[in-house]
Amino acid sequence: MPNWINRLLGGRDNAPAERKAFAGHTLLSLSQLGAANWSHRGFASLVNEGFGKNPVVYRCVRLIAETANRVPLVVSEGGRRVDEHPLATLVARPNGRQSGGELLEAIYAYLQTAGNAYLQAGIVDGEVRALFCLRPDRMKVVAGSDGWPMAYDYTAGGRTIRLRQDEGPVPSVLHMALFHPLDDHYGMAPLEAAQTSLDIHNAAGQWNKALLDNAARPSGALVYSAGQNLTEEQFNRLKDELEANFSGAGNAGRPMVLEGGLDWKTIALTPRDMDFIEARHAAARDIALAFGVPPMLLGLPGDNTYANLAEANRALWRQTLIPLVIRVASELSTWLGPAFDGATIVPDFDGVEALAEDRAALWSRVGGAEFLSDAEKRAMLGI
């Protein structure tokens, strides 16, 4: 152990100790000076620590996935909506176990938690008959000699199946990935960007729980003032017991039984002194920021960016949900269009209540444009 730590802890180095009439020893815990412990990066770890344990992450993912799923995806041919179409039937019922809404909700949720979403086409007799959503942690890109994906390996139950991209009327796998500046194939999820705030929020909850379990006693220092020196064995035993039994969030505030000559001196800052609650709220707001969800919609205090809930809800649609839905619809159209004679999949935002005010303003502007013909006005309104 370095000499400065020995001196700080009242320890001894190799030189003989100096004898004095009074020798007082202070025993401190230095565990909080170590490096911070962060959760491991990776889909499984982040989902367990975030979606599985953090209410802010859970609500953000559910809010985005469920709300985006309210936008119906319709089929268009030549700019006209077509309700009776094989592609519309496929989107409404992609496979025997899932509805179209269930499949889309999984896509939106995987993009938020993994940054990647994978769809497999069930091709029978040269036609796309089914769509299946695959778990991102089971997929692996197989790059060709040119660096582009030539296949995907799907591993489940101890078996790996290679899904090639050059067989069938369309590539067998659609890979949707959010932008990642340092990765050629895989995307970066909002959950990954929020990892630091996620760990702070979870650690704060664990710390508060530990304090409650241990009567909310703050930490401090042991002072030995019995008028004589501790032996080396006594000093090391006290130090080891302090670090092993009273350090870290799991032992926060744990009561101590003191022997003769030992006195407890409180020196640590209390959670109130450190503005602990506000730090936890700040971490929660940072998590919501990474997902693009206005904190007001999550009931987080201290956020006055929006005048009311209606304005915050419109901001969620404009900044997060509309770009996400348009992105997914565009990816599906590019992937499935060649197998359905060039038909496209487009989102229908007309039925979204939160956007009714925007649609009314658009109708008013287009309707008042006297220099446009009725056909041009219909085209501008998507009719």
Image: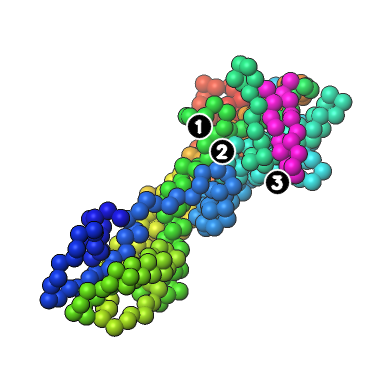
Residue 191 in the image, given as x and y percentages of width and height: 51, 45
Please, what is the three-letter code of the amino acid marked with disc 3? Glu
Q: In this image, 194 relative to 114: left or right?
A: left
Q: Nearer the viewer, mark 1 or mark 3?
A: 1
Query: Does residue 381 appear to the left or right of 319 in the view shown?
Result: right
Q: Earlier in the sequence, mark 2 or mark 3?
A: 3
Q: Quadrant of the C terminus?
A: top right
Name the one closer to the observer, 22 or 137: 22
Q: Is residue 49 rendered to the left or right of residue 136?
A: left
The secondary structure type at the circle numbered 3 is: helix
Dot 1 falls on a residue whose secondary structure is: loop
Residues packed near mark 2 inside 10 Å, few (<14), some (14 to 19) or many (20 plus) = many
The magenta span reads: 150-166
Q: Earlier in the sequence, mark 2 or mark 1?
A: 2
- Residue lying farthest to the top in this orientation: 146
Q: Earlier in the sequence, mark 1 or mark 3?
A: 3
Q: Which residue is mark 2?
A: 115
Does the magenta stretch mainly form a helix, a strand or a loop? Answer: strand
Looking at the image, which residue is at 31% across and 60% down?
A: 30
Helix, strand or loop under label 2 = loop
Badge 1 amino acid: His
The single residue placed furthest to the left in the displayed view is: 21
* Mark 1–mark 3 distance (CA, rounded to whole Å): 27 Å
Residue 153: quadrant of the picture: top right
Q: How many marks?
A: 3
Q: Is residue 307 something that shows in the picture?
A: no
* Vertical order, 105 against 162 (above or below): below
Q: Quadrant of residue 212?
A: bottom left
Q: Which residue is mark 3?
A: 102
Q: Which residue is mark 1?
A: 180
Q: Are marks 2 and 1 in contact (CB under 8 Å)?
A: yes
